[in-house]
Image (spheres, helix red, strand yellow):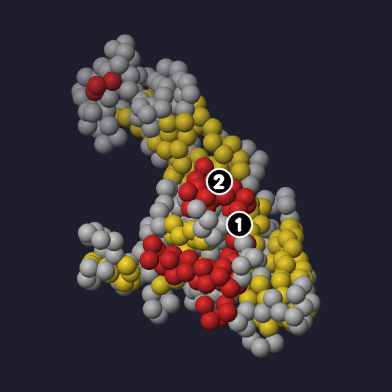
Amino acid sequence: MQWAVQAGARIVNMSLGAGVTDGTDPLSALVDSLTAQTGVLFVVAAGNDGAAMQVETPAAAASALSVGAVDSSYHMASFSSAGPRLRDAAVKPEVTAPGPVGIIAARARNTSLGTPVDDLYTRMSGTSMATPHVAGTAALFAQSHPNWHAAELKALITSSAKDTGAPWYQQGTGCVDVPSAMGSAALGPPSVSLGRLSDQDGKTTRAVTYTNLTDKPVELSLAVGMNEWDGKPAPAGSARLDKSSVAVPANGQATVNLAVDSTAGPTGPYGGAITATTRGGTSIRSGVSFYAESRMFPLTATVTDSRGAPATPSGGELTITRDDYDWAHPNSNDPFIPPVLTMPLANGTGTIQVPAGRYSTSAVTVEQDTTIRRPTCWSPRRPLWTDRRRSRSTRARPCPSAPRRGSRRTCGSSSSRCSVTCPTTRCPRPAPSSLPRRDGRPT
């Protein structure tokens, strides 16, 4: 990247990725730094993981123009990595371009990458094949606008993209459209990202600025459309513009305000587009997104051995499972909160921050002291829960004593019970290696 900038490139095409990030990693930071210093536009492939929240660095950089892939019918390619960006739910990728079903491109001599067509060309699919279409488009407009830098070039491409009907976190503003870009009378921002918003933030406002590229005033009618993560329209009041139309003076700018309310609907990512339409029917699209974050609470779990002393399972951590995760409808869950969490333990105790809900965990501890005589009661999926008032810890509880012959003893709380049955006619106090299982047979 540094070499390309030093060589005088105005557009840099990048077909590489170094893992999914939130755009604050060193590679993304370098993209942002070089763009700020030189105005060079980095056009970067989003990746080929084909899943949500999988846009890799350096495509995750705020200043990079990240590209997904569509086929000739404008359907999203199954392999095209989708957003939104980690942590702040920013719109990534920002545009799409043709990438699947075998794009034919120049072949380097004596190489076998893709499916060679002849000595000069090869056929490949991927966001790596979509990205050069966008880089080439940017080069066309860098040539026709010698004084433009990355911000203007990126805004022209995203503003004029064709809406393909895909979700905002897959297509951005849509598929690159060169004829539409050539006829653009005005530009909007590539995207408006409001980041993470808590319920304490309430209503948050961002300015949205439009630039007139002509020497005549431009009238724009305005509308904003946003969806929840599962594709349903966002509740009324989630996003509003303070104007339904705006007049942009010749060769000038005009600003409207976008207000979003993070408490209007359920928590999770929200996204869509602000569409400004000219009197001639030309659409100018800008991506918009925010993340309504859940209020977090501390969940503490404590593991003890049969004598009540702190015990740390193998691996030094607990696996915490969300009981209220909807496995049948994955898109109905907040994608930023995984179904399985990890709780590191220190001296048998750990604490993590979780949203209100129900949680379960399981653990196995091994005791090698041969003087241990008491079976330990432990519910393998004992429910844990948090709410706004309290957090709850759980622990294994030892039985008061071994069961008598032929008897059945129950111990534990009302919400977590385990029973042991003496399997022999003579009932000695069992050693750890012969503790009865719940089915009554020796372990």
Residue depicted at 56% across the width and 57% down the height: 40
- Name which residue type carries label 2: Ala
Query: Which sits in the foreground, 186 or 359?
Result: 186
State which quarter of the image contains the C terminus: top left
Name the residue tied to disc 1. Answer: 39
108 left or right of 297 in image: left
Q: Assign a secondary structure to mark 1.
A: loop
Look at the image and tell me whether residue 326 can be seen.
no
Q: Give how far across and how far down residue 93 sits, in percent.
A: 50, 62
In the shown orientation, is residue 29 left or right of residue 323?
right
Give the percent coordinates (x, y) of residue 15: 40, 57
Residue 433: name its quadrant.
Answer: top left
Above or below, 73 against 199 in this view is: below
Q: Nearer the viewer, residue 125 or 214?
A: 214
Q: Is residue 97 left or right of residue 8?
A: left
Q: Position of residue 318 (x, y in %)?
A: 43, 34
Q: Residues within 10 Å of mark 1 (few under 14, many from 20)?
A: many
Number of marks in the image?
Answer: 2
Q: Which of disc 2 and disc 1 is earlier in sequence?
A: 2
Q: Which residue is mark 2?
A: 29
- Give me the residue at 50% from left, 40% from top: 384
- Left or right of residue 147: residue 394: left
Gap in Å between the C-alphas at discs 1 and 2? 15 Å
Q: Would you place residue 428 above or below residue 341 in this image?
A: above
Dot 2 falls on a residue whose secondary structure is helix
Q: Amino acid at mark 1?
A: Gly
- Residue in front for this viewpoint, 316 or 85: 85
| Disc 2 packing (10 Å; few <14; some 14–19; many ≥20) | some
